[in-house]
Image (tube, rainbow, N blue to C red):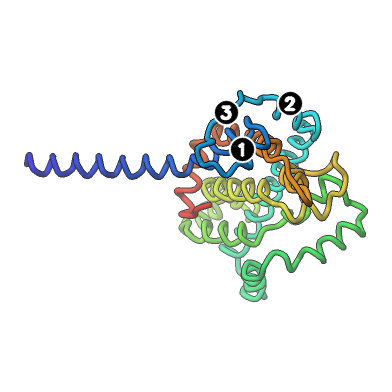
């Protein structure tokens, strides 16, 4: 018995050492980003591998310069509004479509769901030109609606919620029907609350994908006051030279909203990822 306990203790120690090492490896890019933001440009582009810490003082002014030059309050507002509306639209449309495909019977159901699966299989870049033309014809370029437009519906969310609804027993709907609930009441009061974990997962994935979206914001927004964090960071790269400390300072400021959101919703984040079985 003592040998078993010793072996379990050793295995646990080894596991913690490996996990700690992997966590350090994952944190290295973020630490390097912050340290580069506090250096001079000459130190940042130096090939000397021992220039880990700033050699001539900590240059906090890089953050102030970037903050004033790129109006980060506007960038935060545009990005957070895009994330918020995309999450709301994705959860709303996906839960209704998922319920229809997962629980109802109607003509053409399999064909329509096949179209949803095809949309998941093809690259998203194929839809860029049609979506841009639609937004342009609507006169919605350089607007929040233009940023949100590709996220109004989501094929991935429809598939995820369909799977969630299919996992629920039929007895729930039958019992609700006996009690006098119509199909709308069954959906709103009985079935939808039971797919809360799937909707949390969809909300997390949608928020992360929206935050990382680069191509669409660069195409649909041409004005500085309507762009997002990712597009603004991409435009900081110069043709012949780049101010790397300023870029890293801007990247650090850009990461802060997602860090705050993760800290606040850490429990829901972990629950959603664990329930969906997915990974980012």
Give percent across and percent down for residue 171. Answer: 46, 57
Give percent across and percent down for residue 95. Answer: 62, 54
Is 185 positioned to the left or the right of 280 in the image? Answer: right
Is 168 positioned to the left or the right of 8 in the image? Answer: right
| Label 3: few (<14), some (14–19) or many (≥20) C-alpha neighbours in 10 Å | few
Of circles 3 and 2, which is in front? 3
Give percent across and percent down for residue 128. Answer: 78, 63
Q: Earlier in the sequence, mark 1 or mark 3?
A: 3
Residue 278, compared with residue 108, is above or below; it is above
- Which residue occupies the foreground of this view, 79 or 160? 79
Residue in the picture at 31% in, 41% down: 17
Q: Are marks 3 and 2 in contact (CB under 8 Å)?
A: no
Of the 4 image quadrants, the one containing the N terminus is top left
Of circles 1 and 3, which is in front? 3
Q: Distance of mark 3 from mark 2, alpha carbons?
A: 20 Å
Using the rendered image of the protein, determine whether residue 208 is visible from the camera's viewpoint.
yes
For disc 3, the marked residue is: 55
Q: Distance of mark 1 from mark 3, alpha carbons?
A: 30 Å
For disc 2, the marked residue is: 64
Of circles 2 and 1, which is in front? 2
Tell me the SS state at disc 3: loop
Q: Earlier in the sequence, mark 2 or mark 1?
A: 2
Q: Which mark is residue 258?
A: 1
Residue in the picture at 90% in, 58% down: 136
Q: Distance of mark 2 from mark 1, alpha carbons?
A: 20 Å
Q: Earlier in the sequence, mark 3 or mark 2?
A: 3
């Amino acid at each position: 018995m003592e040998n078993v306990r010793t072996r379990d203790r050793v295995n646990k120690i080894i596991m913690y050492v490996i996990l700690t090492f992997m966590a350090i490896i994952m944190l290295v890019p973020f630490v390097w980003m912050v340290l580069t933001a506090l250096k001079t440009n000459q130190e940042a582009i130096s090939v000397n591998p021992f220039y880990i810490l700033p050699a001539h003082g900590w240059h906090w002014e890089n953050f102030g310069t970037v903050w004033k030059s790129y109006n980060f309050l506007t960038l935060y507002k545009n990005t957070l509004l895009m994330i918020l509306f995309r999450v709301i639209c994705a959860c709303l449309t996906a839960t209704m479509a998922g319920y229809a495909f997962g629980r109802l019977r109607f003509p053409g159901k399999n064909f329509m769901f096949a179209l949803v699966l095809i949309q998941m299989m093809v690259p998203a870049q194929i839809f860029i030109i049609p979506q841009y033309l639609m937004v342009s014809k609507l006169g919605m370029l350089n607007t929040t609606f233009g940023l949100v437009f590709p996220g109004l519906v989501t094929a991935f969310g429809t598939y995820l919620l369909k799977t969630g609804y299919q996992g629920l027993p039929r007895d729930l709907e039958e019992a609700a029907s006996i009690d006098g609930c119509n199909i709308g009441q069954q959906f709103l009061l009985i079935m939808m609350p039971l797919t809360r974990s799937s909707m949390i997962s969809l909300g997390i994935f949608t928020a992360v994908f929206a935050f990382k979206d680069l191509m669409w914001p660069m195409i649909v927004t041409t004005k500085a006051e309507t762009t997002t964090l990712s597009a603004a960071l991409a435009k900081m790269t110069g043709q012949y030279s780049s101010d790397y400390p300023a870029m890293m300072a801007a990247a650090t400021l850009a990461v802060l909203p997602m860090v705050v959101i993760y800290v606040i919703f850490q429990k829901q984040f972990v629950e959603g990822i664990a329930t969906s079985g997915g990974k980012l």
